[in-house]
Image (cartoon, grey):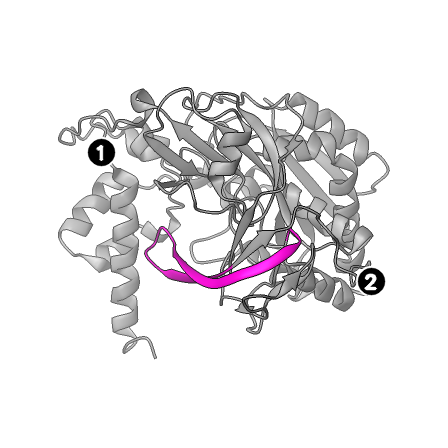
């Protein structure tokens, strides 16, 4: 069990917007809806240029087993079917909609009928809800499993990355919805025990969630140490249940279903209203942002509209990050849209954005001391440089969750986590070759 001792790092929390209730952005003039905002196959457009759409109307159908539908968050006219390039270089088909500013709701919106687990799974599939904590995995897939294997639900309310407070606001402002979503899952999965893990630096969240769950038998709120990456799936499961998820295994292999608190609120909202996932609460912050805020915006809103809503920039932004500063994705494109899994957009000025000078490794071991899984990044780096895939496997490189703790503590300022990513890719390619190729 020592492998899973709470290590990690103590970060500056920078939760500047934690006490700021979300503000709704003015309806954007244009939304850009990528057909892939989730893990799995892209959705397929079901509209064409010139079509009129309304809020909550389907614009992208999920035709594959692992996929998720896409709905419009504005009313207006489809301008074109286009492509944008994601950070990984992949071109993704998009539906571009010009808003009419009316926000007319689609006539077919009505609450789904749910009286069984099968109906709940189907409803969540139709809602377009994916892991809203950033993972983007279609939520219905998690529930469409052997429920006999699940005896505990773990709700992720850790929100351990700096700056991000969108989950914080969900637990404060929509605690009742989180509780309703949890009650649905407990009822239809027939699970008697649930734990909501929240870091101790969020006392208001702990208080509000305890009040919301007061009448839910078997549900508890567990305060957790405010140590990054407390919200990592394997870390969270261990510190809420004491169970270890071994390398290559999933939470269900340990009898656990893990779900984000905002995802639960989204499920309850859809079951109550029938309105699919069409908007997100996003934290807009960073040293270059004039007035940081939590903002509610239609999915597909260009991030430049979010920055404008927050008063623009107080300094020239040198780096824009989708997500948190530890695991987020850097971008230079302010026309890029808000995705389903976008929980923050951060803009940093020169001081914070300038990369530090990299010096040679001094073999101090701080990277290993900070790793939540006790991995040895130095040895992983050596094995990678030697193209020793067998050694990488022995070093359990696939346990790396790419949290960035190793890079954060490195006195030489080496981008260790990037080397770990490349090592994981090397091992994956080696394993494919050993099986005779990816057939």
Q: Nearer the viewer, residue 89 or 163?
A: 89
Q: Is residue 128 left or right of residue 346?
A: right
Image coordinates for residue 139, horizontal then vertical, percent:
62, 57
On whether residue 87 falls in the magenta region, the answer is yes
Nearer to us: label 1 or label 2: 2
Asked whether residue 8 is in view, the answer is no
Q: Residue 317, located in which quarter of the rendered image?
A: top left
Q: Is residue 276 left or right of residue 421?
A: right
Asked whether residue 37 is in view, the answer is yes
Q: Which stretch appears magenta? A: 73-95
Q: Which residue is drawn at 82% across and 51% down?
A: 272
Which secondary structure lies at badge 2? loop
On the image, numbered disc 1 is attached to which residue?
Answer: 414
On the image, numbered disc 2 is attached to which residue?
Answer: 114
Image coordinates for residue 428, horizontal then vertical, percent:
30, 62
Q: Residue at x 18, y 26 (%)?
A: 357
Dot 2, crowdedness within 10 Å: few (<14), some or many (≥20)? some
């Amino acid at each position: 069990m020592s492998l899973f001792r709470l290590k990690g790092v103590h970060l500056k929390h920078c939760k500047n917007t934690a006490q700021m209730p979300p503000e709704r952005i003015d309806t954007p003039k244009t939304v850009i809806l990528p057909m892939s905002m989730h893990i799995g196959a892209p959705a397929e457009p079901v509209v064409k240029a010139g079509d009129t759409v309304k809020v909550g109307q389907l614009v992208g159908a999920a035709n594959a087993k692992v996929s998720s539908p896409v709905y419009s968050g504005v009313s207006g006219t489809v301008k074109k079917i286009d492509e944008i390039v994601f950070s990984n270089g992949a071109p993704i088909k998009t539906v571009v909609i010009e808003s009419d500013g009316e926000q007319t709701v689609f006539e077919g919106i009505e609450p789904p009928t749910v009286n069984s687990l099968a109906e709940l799974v189907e409803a969540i599939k139709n809602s377009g809800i994916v892991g809203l904590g950033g993972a983007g995995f279609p939520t219905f897939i998690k529930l469409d499993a052997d429920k006999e294997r699940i005896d505990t639900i773990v709700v992720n309310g850790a929100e351990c990355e700096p700056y991000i407070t969108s989950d914080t606001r969900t637990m404060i402002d929509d605690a009742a919805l989180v509780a309703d979503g949890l009650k649905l899952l407990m009822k239809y999965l027939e699970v008697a025990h649930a734990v909501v893990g929240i870091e101790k630096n969020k006392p208001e969240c702990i208080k509000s969630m305890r009040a919301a769950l007061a009448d839910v038998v078997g549900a508890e709120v567990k305060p957790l140490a405010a140590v990054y990456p407390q919200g990592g799936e394997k870390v969270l499961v261990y510190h809420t249940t004491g169970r270890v998820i071994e390398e290559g295994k999933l939470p269900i292999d340990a009898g656990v279903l893990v779900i984000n608190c905002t995802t639960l609120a989204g499920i309850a909202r859809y079951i109550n209203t029938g309105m699919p996932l069409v908007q997100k609460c996003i934290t807009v912050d960073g040293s270059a942002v004039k007035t940081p805020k939590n903002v509610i915006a239609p999915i597909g809103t260009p991030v430049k509209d979010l920055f404008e809503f927050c008063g623009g920039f107080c300094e020239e932004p040198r780096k824009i990050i989708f997500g948190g500063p530890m695991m987020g994705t850097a971008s230079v494109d302010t026309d890029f849209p808000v995705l389903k899994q976008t929980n923050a957009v951060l803009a940093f000025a020169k001081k914070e954005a300038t990369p530090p000078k990299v010096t040679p490794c001094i073999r101090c071991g701080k990277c290993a001391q900070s790793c939540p899984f006790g991995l040895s990044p130095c040895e992983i780096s050596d094995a990678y440089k030697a193209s020793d895939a067998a050694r990488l496997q022995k070093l359990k490189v696939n346990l790396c969750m790419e949290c960035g703790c190793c890079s954060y503590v490195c006195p030489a300022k080496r981008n260790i986590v990037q080397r770990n990513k490349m090592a994981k890719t090397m091992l994956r390619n080696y394993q494919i070759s050993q099986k005779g190729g990816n057939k």
